Amino acid sequence: MTFAVKASDWALLSPEIFLSAAGLLLLAISVLIGKEREEFLGYLATLSVFVTGALVVFVALRPDRGMPILGGAFVVDNFALFFKALILLSLVLSILASVKFVGQAPYPGGEYYALLLFAGVGMLFMASGNNLISIYISLETMALASYVLAGYFKGEIKSTEAALKYFILGAFSSGVLLYGLSLVYGVTGTMGLPELAKKLAGAERSNLLMLGILLILAGLLFKIAAVPFHVWTPDVYEGSPTPVTAFFSVGPKVAAYAILARIYYVAFPKFHPDWGLIVALVSAATMILGNIAALLQTNVKRMLAYSSIANAGYALLGVLGFRTEWGLWGILIYLLAYTFMNFGAFTLVILLESRGYAGESVSDFNGLAQRNMPAAILMLIFLLSLAGLPPTAGFIGKYYLFAAAWKAGYVWLAVVAVAMSAVSLFYYFRIAAAMFFSEAAGAKVQSSYALTAVAAVCGLGTLLIGVLPQPFIAVLKSCVLSP
Amino acid sequence: MDFSNIPILSIVTYIPLVGALAVVFLIPKEKTGTIKAFATFVAVLDFVVSLPLWWAFDRGKDGYQFVEKAEWIPSLGVSYQFGIDGISLVLILLTTLMGVIAIVCSYTAISDRQKEYYVLLLLLQTFMIGTFCCLDLFLFYVFWEVMLVPMYFLIGVWGGQRRLYAAIKFFLYTLAGSVLMLLGIIALYFYNTSGFLGYKGLGNPATFSIEKLTAVAQQMPPELQVWLFFAFFLGFAIKVPMFPFHTWLPDAHTEAPTAGSVILAAILLKMGTYGFVRFSLPMFPEAVRDRRVIAVMVALAIIGIVYGAMVTLVQKDMKRLIAYSSVSHLGFVMLGVFALNMSGMQGGILQMINHGISTGALFLLVGILYERRHTRMISEYGGLAKQMPVYATYFMIMVLSSMGLPLLNGFIGEFTILQGAFAKNFWWAFFAATGIVLGAAYLLWLYQRLFFGEITNPANAKLPDLTLREQLTLLPLVILALWIGLYPGPIFRVIRRPSEKIVQIVGGATAEAPALAEKTAAPGASGGGVAARP
């Protein structure tokens, strides 16, 4: 494959290029800066994400943005732009939520922020990946940075364990994914998603091709932590530093959904009926197991890990709904809502970390209403949203997803989804009960400016999408893929 | 009065919300006196503002009145739409009145975290009124769900010993029911627009307007109607609560603080019956006419009446006793509604109000006693009539009202319901009537154990009688009970049009039924004129 690099390619890739350079620069600067002034690095990283955001806006305003880049390896369409915005949002929230945490940790902060930025670069590429190979490489860029981030507390056994588990299982799943990609390539002889769609439009279904499609699916289901590929999640989430966990639960998942949607929506639309039932079963299993397992947790991070597994199950309803426009709408709006509400919930966990590293239990929230009322109310909003109650973002997102499942004809799955959604209230509201019904256990809770800002942004987003969803929906509807 | 230029329903709905925000941001939590006074002021203001609706409401007009409409989520076809008919009108007035009573009855009963308490009561008020005002199904669902949150906290923070269990049970039960309703709503939405499964959609523009969707739902094939009827059924039946979905109710009622029980009994349970009347019946007439569906509904209603009453008989805890009596009374409402004739429908709707008044008052009375003695066990009391004569009198009136003694409100409701049931099937009325007998038994027995005989427990020897404030919370309810008992005409006139329409849709209408209900339902009344008041 040969192609010429056009000038416009550089312009369209400017966010990724800038963010990579910023990460490298950050690493260099961190050598010069003492441990006590590491906060500065955090703010520098924040600034670079904002600049990247500005560049994304610049790209969005270019008339040539829909053109294939680097010979069709990437494409920056509205869909990609939406995910880039969402990824940058989760990135900036992660960085701000980390500032205090990293400052107190006995490990160098420069590499932490740099790794976050590198993971961000990988995710930005994932959002616009338009070719099986470029998608795979972007995914690995993100994944490698994530493995290291999980083990950032290298002196802690749990953190090291998390990193190792994540790495081994992640490498295995990447292998599965790559195997699937190679099978698809072997059958079709092409890597570009639009070309694949063209080739497959007239193709017969063959066992080899089906196997390839399924293996790709399995690899991606691992990344979004769907049952039965979920076992790594609770351990990794519990063991990783909490801001990293917050990041894992949002950023990489969002990016993985971007490629899942793009591959299956653009390249394999013809075979929707073939993998539909499998996705339906996976989705049902994910919702049921995620929610039931979450019921049994006392550690908040593990509970939120299982909750994020359950949420992956809901989002799969949107994948099922790809045959109608409801599926993509559902995924987009749900991921937007999920970013705000899930990150918000983790922010409160970070705020309340009382027993140092990874000792977060539901009782940490005891009496939060008396210790810090605004924090308790914010957490309540996140919990309501996660449970899918109106008037919050989670409700609007779930409405679209349930509608997508219904429209796609999976009525039984919609019933499972709503039933599990009701079950989820039970564990979410254990936290609410602890906050409002228990006597205050700890001192008054003081928040830092950065954490307050993160929680406030998440709370505002969660409520705004819930109460006035129209502008968000209007934007999202212009961001869907065209098959 | 002309409200055509004023969004009166929104004003009534959001006054408590604004009041709650004002308390949150303007009044420090130490100033409990100010908080109480202000919360009371807000609730009274809301009641006063809602009162003119009674006179401005045109009883002769079909359809919804005071309609407000605005865009909300045009992408989904969701609009912000408010409007009321006679049924919602009486329920809204009951809600605004109960809001005042709930706040006033809490002055001394609630001593900790008062600011949060009154804020939650006011919020709950907004959500309840909003639910009754909605003309958009999506908006209705939002209010319906969000209402659970303040009630959850009211039970969980200020409740009795098993409050945590009761609070989450209440929340989970009602939520589990309503999420299925959400699927029903989605199905309706798709049926109206692009279709789903094998059903070809009507291709209309997306909408959640209750009026439009009602018309659409009526055209659905019968089997789909039955499915959707049961999707909605669960949400409403749990809220009512119908047997066998009632088990959350005794716990929630018993553990909730007095005001919580009052609101639960008087308003929240009515959401379920209101849902049946507003949605299930007019939307799915084919399903409602289906013999099997009727059989199930009536059987559950009658089991609720008889079983509820029998369980009530053996209760030792006053609050639990009244809670179970609600199961029985709400069974009457459901029986009336599913008799599908004019008497049954009107009686059912009136009985919703009656139950709110009588049971609300009984919970108030029990709360007053609990505040003095901190026990709800009936065996702890006895001979109170000598020590608290005024209290005993109020209690007597409400017991009689609840058991359906003529001249009081309960009689009118139950009689009209039985009349409707009788017109359909002798045995329905027969079994339901046993519920009345049992009702008299458990209520009079309760009264006897509490008030008659000698004071055996020394702790009861020096109980103070009602204070002026306590009497003020009870007096409006007594007046209403007497008014409805003596002269129910005005209420029947308000609910007649919407009832007629529903009965007509479900196809069980008989021409003479409304007149019959008017005449016979007002035994002591000085004539129940038919003409609408000017």
Image (cartoon, helix red, strand yellow):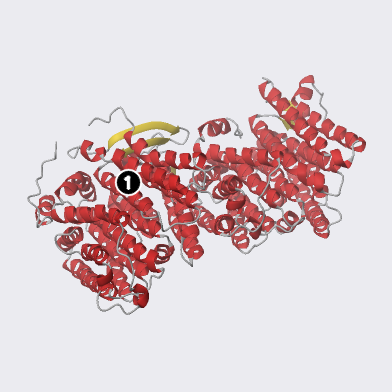
Q: Residue lying farthest front?
A: B462
- Whether residue A356 appears in this view of the structure is yes
Picture quadrant of residue B427: bottom left
The x and y percentages for residue B383 are 27, 75
Question: In which quarter of the view is residue A71 placed?
Answer: top right
**Residue B220 left/right relative to B408:** right
From this view, report whether residue B231 is shown above or below residue B301.
Answer: above
The mark tally for this picture is: 1
Outermost right residue: A32
Residue at 34 percent of width and 70 percent of height = B462
Residue at (87%, 34%) from the top-left corner?
Answer: A24
- Please tell me whether residue B116 is drawn above or below residue B18 in the rendered image: below
Residue that label 1 marks: B96
Left or right of A432 in this view: B69: left
Q: x and y percent of residue A480 in the render?
A: 59, 34
Per the image, label 1 sits on a secondary structure element best described as helix
Task: From this view, report whether residue A407 is shown above or below residue A357.
Answer: above
Question: Depth check: B31 or A281 in front?
Answer: B31
* Quadrant placement of the C terminus of chain A: top right
Out of B333 and A405, give the one closest to the viewer.
B333
Q: Chain of mark 1?
A: B
How far from the left and from the top, in percent, is residue B143? 42, 45
